[in-house]
């Protein structure tokens, strides 16, 4: 039996709706094909044009890969016309309860968005751009330094009848493109990997804050309607209860991020982490020295593996940054969970059932996991959530909710890793 029909079968590649990159794009099953990342039908000129990019990340590729992965290459159904009105009503109720519990009046500032999977992906291609460009810039600088250490690149004259590959890449005629291969590949590889991460996340995201992603755009309350519907059916959850739960969760996290220093700190730590990658020239050569840019499978072998690209750049400096990043995100998540408990147990009849389903949901991310960890170093296990929640409950036991709400006064109020384990130390430091 042959392969099942794929979206757009029988149509020319460059006429297929949503087909990435037109005729110089990916195979019929999308950027990863049925058996992986598929560049097999490209000729050399097409491949070289695809590798051209302005800036450290090829954002056109990132955007198209994110959309394709998010939707599995299938058109999405239109959102119900009354979806926005329904979620606005739930958000208004959630805002009132969040402000009453926390005093974070910033909750009233976050607008509501109703999204499909492609919409979530498009939003986050932009929202994560600052951190991913910082990562790409560091990678670009490291590779440039490594190439400079190797000495000047020799010019080459193409064989008669063969294309000048250097010229196809926008280099001076006669330049050897293989000597600049990794610098040339980096933008498209990071574009593919960034798009893949965002696309895989979009397949499962219920809102904006399922994970503490270092987004730098204006916080908002997002509801990914097709994923909410699928989650509701999978767990047999009451629709209104689930949607109100997500509205409260989104509102809590948006209110946190609208405190001026909170989102800035999260993005700053993420940029510090990706800026701490250090190139190991030997490891880099071992991993990528045999890449053949004329062989699509050779390129494909690293395009979908962030751990291969960045594994040669990990450094000891990142461990300290990662501890601080995980401490901060644990506190953000723990605070939201504690307040959500107080609101949900009073107002949501099926709260216990929904909360257990949500705990499992945020720990099972499928393919997205290795991209999140490989690109951003962001890996939160159950213990990180539990540690943050235990800290917040410990503060409330000693100083009440008012004591816990002092977290938002300034960046100096963020607990250290040691204080996260011992709330009394934090309270002593802030004179409570």
Image (cartoon, grey):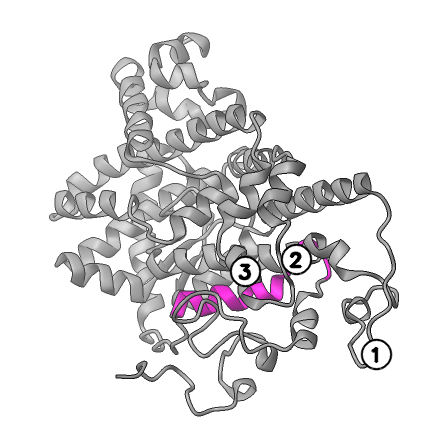
**What is the C-alpha distance between the residues marked 3 and 2?**
11 Å
Q: Quadrant of residue 178?
A: bottom right
Q: Residue at x 52, y 39 (%)?
A: 263
Q: Is the magenta stretch mostly helix, strand or loop?
A: helix
Left or right: 425 as drawn, with respect to 12: left
Above or below for 11 versus 273? below
Where 273 sits versus 362, above or below?
above
- How many numbered circles does the render carry? 3
Distance, label 2 to label 1, CA atoms, is: 26 Å
Residue under label 3: 192
Q: Residue beneath label 2, please?
A: 185
Could you say which quadrant of the image residue 103 lies in? top left
Asked which secondary structure carries label 1, the reply is loop
Callout 3 crowding tier (Cα within 10 Å): few <14, some 14–19, many ≥20 = many
Q: Is residue 270 positioned above or below 113 on the image?
A: above
- Residue 354 drawn at (x, y percent): 18, 48
Mark 2, Cα crowd under 10 Å, few <14 / some 14-19 / many 20+, is many
Q: Name the residue under label 1.
A: 160
Q: Quick one: 368 or 175, which is closer to the camera? A: 175
Q: In this view, does 273 lie above or below 70?
A: above
């Amino acid at each position: 039996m042959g392969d099942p029909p794929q979206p757009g079968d029988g149509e020319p590649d460059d006429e297929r709706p949503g087909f990435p990159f037109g005729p110089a794009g990916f195979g019929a099953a999308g950027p990863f094909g049925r058996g992986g990342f598929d560049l097999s039908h490209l000729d050399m000129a097409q491949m070289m044009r695809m590798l051209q990019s302005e800036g450290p990340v090829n954002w056109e590729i990132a955007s198209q890969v994110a959309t394709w992965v998010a939707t599995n290459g299938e058109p999405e159904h239109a959102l119900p016309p009354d979806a926005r009105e329904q979620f606005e009503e739930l958000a208004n109720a959630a805002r009132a309860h969040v402000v009453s519990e926390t005093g974070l009046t910033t909750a009233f500032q976050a607008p509501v968005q109703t999204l499909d999977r492609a919409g979530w992906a498009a939003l986050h291609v932009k929202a994560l751009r600052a951190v991913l460009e910082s990562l790409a810039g560091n990678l670009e600088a490291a590779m440039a330094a490594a190439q400079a250490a190797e000495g000047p690149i020799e010019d080459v004259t193409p064989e008669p009848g063969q294309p000048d590959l250097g010229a196809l890449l926008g280099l001076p005629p006669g330049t050897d493109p293989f000597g600049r291969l990794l610098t040339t590949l980096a933008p498209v590889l990071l574009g593919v990997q960034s798009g893949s991460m965002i696309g895989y996340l979009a397949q499962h995201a219920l809102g904006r804050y399922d994970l503490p992603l270092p987004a730098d755009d204006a916080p908002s309350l997002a509801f990914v309607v097709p994923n909410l519907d699928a989650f509701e059916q999978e767990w047999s959850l009451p629709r209104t209860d689930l949607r109100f739960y997500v509205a409260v969760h989104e509102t809590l996290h948006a209110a946190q991020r609208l405190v001026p220093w909170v989102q800035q700190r999260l993005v700053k730590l993420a940029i510090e982490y990706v800026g701490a990658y250090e190139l190991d020239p030997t490891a880099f050569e071992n991993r990528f020295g045999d890449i053949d840019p004329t062989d699509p499978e050779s390129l494909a072998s690293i395009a979908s593996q962030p751990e291969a690209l960045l594994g040669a750049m990990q450094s000891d400096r990142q461990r300290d940054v990662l501890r601080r990043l995980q401490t901060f995100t644990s506190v953000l998540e723990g605070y939201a969970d504690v307040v959500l408990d107080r609101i949900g147990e009073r107002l949501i009849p099926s709260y216990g059932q929904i909360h257990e389903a949500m705990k499992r949901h945020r720990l099972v991310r499928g393919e997205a996991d290795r991209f999140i960890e490989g690109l951003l170093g962001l890996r939160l296990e159950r213990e990180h959530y539990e540690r943050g929640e235990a800290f917040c409950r410990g503060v409330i036991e000693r100083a009440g909710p008012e004591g816990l709400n002092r977290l938002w006064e300034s960046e100096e109020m963020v607990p250290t890793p040691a204080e996260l384990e011992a709330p009394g130390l934090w309270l002593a430091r802030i004179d409570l």
